[in-house]
Amino acid sequence: MSDTALQTSGFPWLTAVVFLPLAGAVLLFFVKDAAVRWTALAVALADLALSFPLFFLYDRSATGMQFTERVAWIASPPINYAVGVDGISLPLLLLTTLLTPLCVLVSWRAIETRLREFMATILVMATAMLGVFVALDFVLFYVFWEAMLIPMYLLIGVWGGPNRLYAAVKFFLYTLAGSVLLLIAILVLFFQGGHTFDILLLSKAGYSQTLQNWLFWAFFIAFAVKVPMFPFHTWLPDAHVEAPTAGSVFLASVLLKMGAYGFLRFTLPMLPDATAAFTPIMVGLSLIAILYGAYMALAQADLKKLIAYSSVSHMGFVTLGIFALNAQGIEGALMQMINHGITTGALFICVGIIYERTHSRMIADNFGLANPMPRYATCLVIFALSSLGLPGTNSFVGEFLILIGTFLWNKAAAVVASLGVILAAAYLLWMVQRVAFGPTAGHSALRLSDLNWREMTIMVPLIVLVFWIGLFPNPLLKVMHTSVDHLIEQEDQEDRALARRDAREMRERREARDGHVAQVSLKANNK
Amino acid sequence: MTYEFIPLLPFAAFLILGLFGHWIKDRAHLVAVPAVIVSFILSVLTFMDVAGGRHTSIPLYTWATSGDLRIELGLYVDRLTAVMLLLVTIVSGLVHVYTIGYMQGERGYARFFAYIALFTFSMLMLVMADNFLQLFIFWEAVGLCSYLLIGHWYERPSACSAATKAFIVNRIGDFGFLLGLLLVYLTFGSLEYQQVFAQAPDIAKETFNLLRLIGGQWEVSTLTLICLLLFMGAVGKSAQVPLHVWLPDAMEGPTPISALIHAATMVTAGVFLVARLSPLYSLSPAAMDVVAITGAATMVFGATIALTQFDIKRIVAWSTVSQLGYMMMACGLGAYAAGIYHLLTHGAFKALLFLCCGSVIIALHHEQDMRRMGGLKDKLPVTYWTFVIGSLALAGFPLTAGFFSKDEILVSAWSAGSLGKLLASLGLATALLTAFYSFRLVFVAFWGDSRVDPHHAGHVHEPSWTMTVPLMILAVLSISTGYLGISAFLAPAFPGTASESHHDSPIAIGIMTAATLMGLIGIAAAYVLYVKSPGLPDLLAQQWQQLYRLSFNKWYVDEAYDRMLVRPTVRLADRLWSGVDVAVIDGAVNGVARAIAWGGWLMRLVQSGQTQHYALGMTVGAVLILTVYLLF
């Protein structure tokens, strides 16, 4: 296919978007103390403004990568600086640039020590994460993938809570262990796939079933740790609990998406036969994650742990959608990735805001907040409702598409996944009931102040997105269509024969029906 | 005709109040009330528009596309929609006006108006939906409003628990609804009513193997499965057995919303669902039987509990459960028009009863226990007389609206086969209970000597006109809706309704007489027990202690759920957390780390720095290698 060939377009949009935060991080060391916050915010906002046009410039009808750039980096082995986005990575890229300024704002007062270094770390983190989503060269990808660990490690280890070292080391070693297998897999692909690191070429190379199986599990470990899929999830609650709010937001909203992105970008297109073979296992693990994560969330007394486990459950939906291997499932998974980034990020910000006031994340210490902090309670309720997938909010769109995709693949799996929706309502509303509502007596002495202008500035765009995506998801879905269709075409269709048969039957019925409906509407008109 | 404005106006009111309520404060009604009144006027125009039998679809926008899936939102208006629009806007408008007086001076005044405006919007969108997904979206949205309004007084722990309970119980029902939705899409390839209905007859014979996954064989009609799954949602929303538990607790919310949401409109959405999807249900006799039996069970069950309660709002709430059972039973027996007819008359008289309760509660400074009432009929004459009218309609007293609609249900039921005859008899028996408990309430609360707290007894008086005028209007509606021929108007909107000519038959007259007698006996019994010989009820309660307790404790359903579902779930979560996540999974992770650390420590021992250790190691090694070499 010629349309996947890399052509360098005029303005290097992606390079600018990716490296602007890094430049900003360097700049931070040359400004006055008083200007650190504003500089960091300005850089983050500039990056957001720079990435924003991509949404409109992106050609929704073209398959393949867009805004591509390619520069030779190392001659032998042939490693290129190659970047580009498609309908899968563009939404994630925009999510990241959107969250960066919010993370700066969240840390405005919360961070008291080494502020300059903190803001620099946030910006470096942004560059690393953006790089992962745009890299089209496997080595470049791996560089960004690993580079991401360092700022995250620092965020937790330097600015974290009391048990930060344990959490930071656990996070680092756990994800690094996964990455090692990824590196081996990359090397194997290099030798088996025609001595190239070009992700698009490697996707089309084709590998034997045995090799695919081995690579599948290597990829699986690397990505499943990041997602995290059951049973590789225990680093997540620890990391969240110890991380500062901005760290939690990046972790939940973007880092977890890397694993799912890995499945979509590498596992599915490169290893279609292995994917087909192991889909039942992946679906099984996803279902376990959905229910198990929800049960875990029900048992938590710590708000951050509760939301961390809810992430496990929600990401279970994402992997479920991915391995349903049809358009609805994968687009639902992509939607859910974006939505989880918005909603869970916002919930972590909510926890951070209350922690700044009461210095406790325990549910038992925070109750009856609706009275002293009505605006806060409103935000908390909105994001909790979004998180439990209330129709009209963003998460419903993703969950609904995932459930449709799953239902087309296997009805029983969809039934089990739907149970997770009930449990989500249980743990989130129970949390809201305990934190936001109830008598306020204990807090009168603390004189809790409601959200200030800065905090409202963080909340409002997220609330707008919750409802905008919930009510008008189609513009976002349209960005995904061609890339997802292309991805599915690459898949080995054999094991989806069932789903395709269903789809075909449906089409036939629709054709038959269209005739019928035409008659019906004629009748209606006559009346 | 601009149908879009009917829901849009309340939505605009919601947005204005939601965003600027902080500044609008106690002028909130100036925004919300006009919006609903204009909606009402537009609904009347709509009604006249479609009265001739026309139906219209108005596309709104494409909600989502993905693969073969394409979901367009739109409005659909036919006769059924039109009468529902009238019901919703009338009751909502009156409740809006009533709220001005009821919530006066409350801190959450603007918030309350914002929520009921949002509710009105959602409910209007629900009844105007032209596809399953839109129905589901607003089905959940009205549930959200219900949640927010039950928890309006969020400082009361009981109100918060009731709100959470309502949401979660409804979610259980909606689990079925959602699966039904998916199955509709899989089966019909579309979620639009008209396309699904058009194909339904062709699908009727298709079956679905429920046990395919485990290799079994249990073929079920796909259509029946769809209907039953969707009915799960209706069971939750319309508080049918066994998901009825949330509705009585929902009385924790302010009384105006009990009238609007938990009596007249939202809880009837389940009945509306079955009626709207009648082209599907009618093709599945099995699903219809389930609907009818569930309805009948709820009807009897709710009435038996209402007999012994003391909280006036809860008595009315349990009677709502019971009356919803009547409607559901009617739909299940194919008498959709009768079911919707009762839905409308019930909407009027039950909203009236709730608003009367609210007026009593305000007059007595938030007293809800009828043991501390009595003798109110002289102090609250308007409330009393309107309450009596509402109770007469509920009891099915001749010439009230409730009489006509209940009679319609019973007659249609009787003519619907042997199951219908059985259920009609149950309906007659329940009519007796209904009359008894409604007049028990009248006699105990309004007659006799005052048992009101002496602190408040002196200044019990009628509320302001904003509260009494809605009562009077609803009282008029509680009678007049019986004379509008609604049932005949609706009948053509539904498939295969039993012939409408059976009203003059001897059987119909017999049932009418029997129902009237039942109502009179019930009223008379209440009179004897609570006016003539007031000691008798306690004596009877002593005599039939087991039965009394069963009724008083609501058949212990809440307790059973708590023991069988709620607590095991929480316990399982705790066990899984400490027993599996911390101990096994994270234990393994930390175990690996510890094993590596221990291995490192072991290796460190070897690196001792002492020559004789290295020499020993070398010797042992050499011997071992030599041995291996010599032996093999």
Image (cartoon, coloured by chain):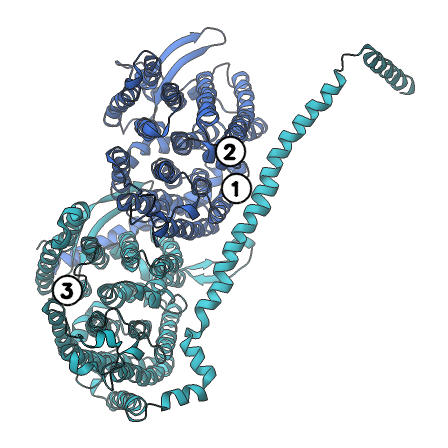
The one nearer the camera, B475 or A467, is B475
* Rendered position, B632 above or below A428: above
* Tag 2 residue: A224
Residue in the image at 37% along x and 52% along y: A433
The one nearer the camera, A464 or A65, is A464
Q: Residues within 10 Å of mark 3 (few under 14, many from 20)?
A: some
* Mark 1 and mark 2 on one chain: yes
Residue in the image at 45% along x and 58% along y: B208
Residue in the image at 56% along x and 31% along y: A217
C-alpha distance separating marks 1 and 3: 56 Å
Left or right: B607, with A298 as reference point: right
Using the image, name the chain to which the residue with label 3 belongs.
B
* Tag 3 residue: B101
- Residue A285 is tagged as 1
Name chain B's colour: cyan
Left or right: A286, with A472 as reference point: right
Left or right: A140, with B379 as reference point: right
Tags 3 and 2 in contact by the CB under 8 Å rule?
no
C-alpha distance separating marks 1 and 2: 10 Å
Q: Quadrant of residue A141?
A: top left
What residue type is disc 2 on? Ala
Q: Is any atom of residue A87 visible in this view?
A: no
Residue A48: image x %, image y %? 27, 24
The one nearer the camera, A273 or B304, is B304
Residue A127: image x %, image y %? 37, 20
Q: Is any atom of residue A109 visible in this view?
A: yes
Tags 1 and 3 in contact by the CB under 8 Å rule?
no
Q: According to the colouring, which chain is blue? A: A
